[in-house]
Amino acid sequence: MEEFLTDTLKTQEYFLNMGPQHPATHGVLRLLLKLDGEIIQNVDMDLGYIHRSIEKMCERDTYKQIVHLTDRLDYLSSHMNNEAVCLLVEKALNIEIPDRIKVIRTLVDELTRISSHVLWWGVMGMDIGALTTFMYGFREREMINDIFEETCGARLTMNYNVIGGVRYDLHENFVKRVKDFIVHFKKKLPEYDTLLSNNVIFRKRLEGIGYISKEDAVAYGLNGPAARASGVSCDIRKIHPYSAYDRAEFDEIIFTEGDSYARYKVRIKEMWESLRILEQLIDKIPEGEHRVKTKAVIKLPEGDYLQRVEAARGDFGVYVKSTGQKFPYRLKLRSPGFANLTALNKMTKGLKIADLVAILSTIDIVVPDIDR
Amino acid sequence: MTNTELKNKIEILSENLIFSGEDGDFLKIEVDKDNLKEFMKKLRDNEELRFDYLFALTGIDFGEELGVVYHLESTKSRKLIQITVKTADRNNPEIDTVHDIFPAAFFNEIEAHEFFGIKFKGHPDLKHLFLPENWDKGYPMRKDYTDINMLIR
Amino acid sequence: MRITGKYFFVNLFTRKDVITEQYPNNIDTLEMFDRFRGEITLYHNENNEHKCDACTLCVSACPNGSLEVFGDKEPDPETGKLIRYLVKHIYHLEMCTMCGLCIEACPQDALEWGQDFHHVQYDRSKLTKVLNKPGSKIMSKEKKKK
Amino acid sequence: MILNIFTDIHNLLLEHMSGQAAHITELVLIAIAYLGIFAILGLFLVWLERRVAGFFQLRLGPNRVGPFGLFQTIADALKLVSKELTGTVKADKFLYGTAPYFVIVTALMAMALIPFSQEIQAFDINIGVFFLTSVSSVGVIGIFLAGWASNNKYSLIGGMRTGIQMISYELSVGMAIVTMVVLAGTLQISEIIEMQKDGWFIFKGHIPAIIAFMIFMIAGTAESNRTPFDLVEAESELGAGFHTEYSGMRFAYYFLAEFVNMFIISSVAVVLFFGGWLSPFGITDGIPFAGLFWFTVKVIGVIFLFMWFRWTFPRFRIDQLLTLEWKYLLPINLVNIVLMALMVWLGLTL
């Protein structure tokens, strides 16, 4: 019977151009799918639809001016991206950073991480077909955005970090608002589980789909929650602690299943961990100044510098080659999304279009981050 | 493991290695472009070192010569090293591909190719990824590339 | 179904959990936070005086050239030295990324954030603004200190 | 009373023209009335869906145009009517143009059988339920043609998915209806409702009826292509599925037909399980228009259930969809029919 079917029923492979305008590609990502019916044979990608060449722009900008450009990479973890540049310059110039700045940075980091994950959760539900999650995710995100707006002056591209500190001191309402948020979010997170995580259809859609082994995850350079779902320990906050992460107690979430559901669970658990960090640090903000005076013109000594931070999507890195001028000679932005996207072809082979959409949203791509 | 110890372990893997930055954050190694592929393979497969995570692959225009900087991390010891490889030929720069050693390098090499014009020998698909498919105005990230639309200060 | 049902009935009867804002209708009651970065403004006091002395430090600090400052020089009535004064402070809102470097660079604290966010225009050229109001003058040094 | 209006019109027409002509005129009048109901119903349901979705999603939904935003959908419909009908050059023009009418005509035909109240039912045929299922299964051709004729790969995938899905789930809908027909012993809709005077079928047929109702709801959701079975459209995967290339009024036909189909499925559920236009315990017997009221209330209740499904559940994958139908629903259904037959035979119904 099997032979009969394969002999007589010939199927023709065809190409489907998914994107650049497509609801599931989270922006202007273009995927070229080679399909047999609904089954994916190969995924090829074409990028660059919103490439702004930030790396080239950085080569003509002073270090102070670079900071705000990194907002525009992964706009959902803009604070972490800023922080990477600031930490790099501070390390290169040996600027001593007071504890208060470190704690503020860490607090805002974790709030950013939660807001990014919450948005991801909403969009994840949308991609799978549960449209309501989007608004529920935005409810929490709105609270965080309000905190940011009050303290930093903007909601998305916050540009709060400056070299040598943060732009403004914490707003007087900050601590109270964050505490309110923690109480609120602790009530709402279990709702996320009942609504989506424990839903039979949802689990059936994700479990065992998009498997990637630990070895492959390392080889493809997967990072962030996507890699941790495969059992790779890669949390920069733990491995190379920066800012105030060394004084907070938290666990690195590691799952070993390596499928889409594990990637989903990692992010949900990470929100709990972020809450833990917030709870520990919110009462212990040291007194002091919010900004260290730096020189008007910052020149890095000649050499190579690298700074990594754990952005919401993973291992974000800035590599600077300096020749001693006030502009970097070469600045490379290592984006987590780009590395995660390279493994897409490996993950989706032999699965269906619907699975591709689910996987694409579990690796949580942000296209400006990939296109840079 | 300090950088000096690491240096001693890496030294024996290949010839013509130039080390620097022992007292810095990470060890910097400059490798001959003919030895690159072999050296990378050894770095990955060496039981003690296990530099198996390609953190970043950066194309650089050094002015006179073009080069690629690899940042490798070991998932075992969590040490980071920087490997630089240079080629003096600006018109036809060729460097061995490492995408068969680190699959992560596949798209990064395409990126370095289209922005710097570095040809990766053995790479199967050096297409235009970021730039338009009919792009023929040179390599935009090179230092000698000029664009009238670019804001110069 | 439990969760969505709960929210449905709560919202049906009380509208308690409704999180959206009725945007164009509530435009009069919307209040932005003090630090909100809406646009860059040049501070003018009640006598139509500003603090800018056209030093153009903000122009050099701007990463994308969204500020243009035109100044001129005239002799000081008392000492006779040539003193710069501001003729036109042009602000291209369409190019501004709200990075705030100009405000930090300003030695006179002449620039500050405006909270207006309603920038919608049909024509891009209308986003180019002249920041100094017509007929405005520079403040005297004593006033600046306050 | 309302019956009097109908007879009055009938007599009026007979006074002025011959019997044949009067008959045809009446048919035309009924057709126009149903077209009106169709349009109003579609627009109202679209509004209801958006409003309900709004409350589910912590929003308000349309609330600007008219009281409670009731005229929002009318404004949208006007926009759609005034829009240009665009199409692709490589589409099969004839099929591309005809496809929407398949969907809308079948929906209209099925509407004829809906008993809005004791008096208002256009076409009370003695094979009513059977006719309804057969007519509504023609609708799939329209969607399938749309997917094929658009000459778009997304549409094609959407169309193919429809074919698979509708054919599979028609079986379950049919089987669930058959279960209830076993209990009723008739196919005529008015008779089915009359039989429920002493108790709705969902109570009369207790266990098998409840099972049949659940299956009917699941399969009915699939029939009307709504989440969690909206693989046909699946906007996050296929853009808009089979109607990707449709615009203006042609798109509106699909849109309205989808909602009217939902109404039809709900009506069938109400007729088969909840006693149609009958009031609970006969509390409003004898009051004119009461039937219409109860019917509407019940149908909106079932429609609300559909909406609740839609705004809660994620979407299935195509293979899971088929597994659910062929491995679970169909066997349960078959057993259920036997169970129901046994119950009717042994007289275990309440």
Image: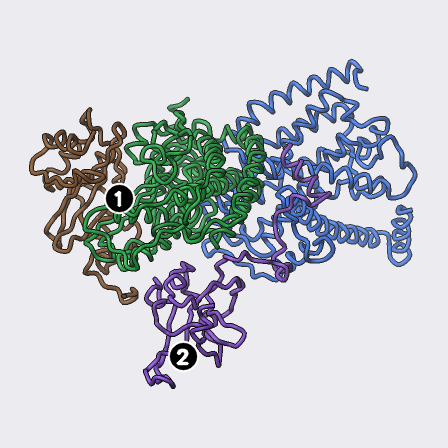
Q: Going by the image, does C65 lie left or right of D195? A: left
Q: Name the colour assigned to chain D in the rendering.
A: blue
Point out residue A93 in the picture as x, y percentages from the top left corner: 26, 49
Chain containing the residue with disc 2:
C
Which quadrant holds residue D114? top right
Residue position for label 1: A306
Residue at x-position 76% and y-position 26%: D202
Report the disc number at residue D192: none
State the SS at label 2: strand
State the SS at label 1: strand
Q: Residues within 10 Å of mark 2 (few under 14, many from 20)?
A: some
Which quadrant holds residue D169? top right
Residue D196, can we see it? yes
Q: Going by the image, does A345 lie left or right of A268? A: left
Residue at x-position 13% and y-position 54%: B90
Chain containing the residue with disc 1:
A
Residue type, label 1: Leu
> Disc 1 vs disc 2: Cβ atoms closer than 8 Å?
no
Image chain in green: A
Q: Residues within 10 Å of mark 1 (few under 14, many from 20)?
A: many
Which color scheme did the rendering employ for the protein? by chain
Which quadrant holds residue A6? top left
Point out residue C88 in the picture as x, y percentages from the top left corner: 41, 77
Residue B111, can we see it? no
Point out residue B79 in the picture as x, y percentages from the top left corner: 24, 33
Residue type, label 2: Val
Residue position for label 2: C87
Q: Name the colour assigned to chain C in the rendering.
A: purple
Q: Name the colour assigned to chain B in the rendering.
A: brown
Q: Residue furthest left?
A: B16
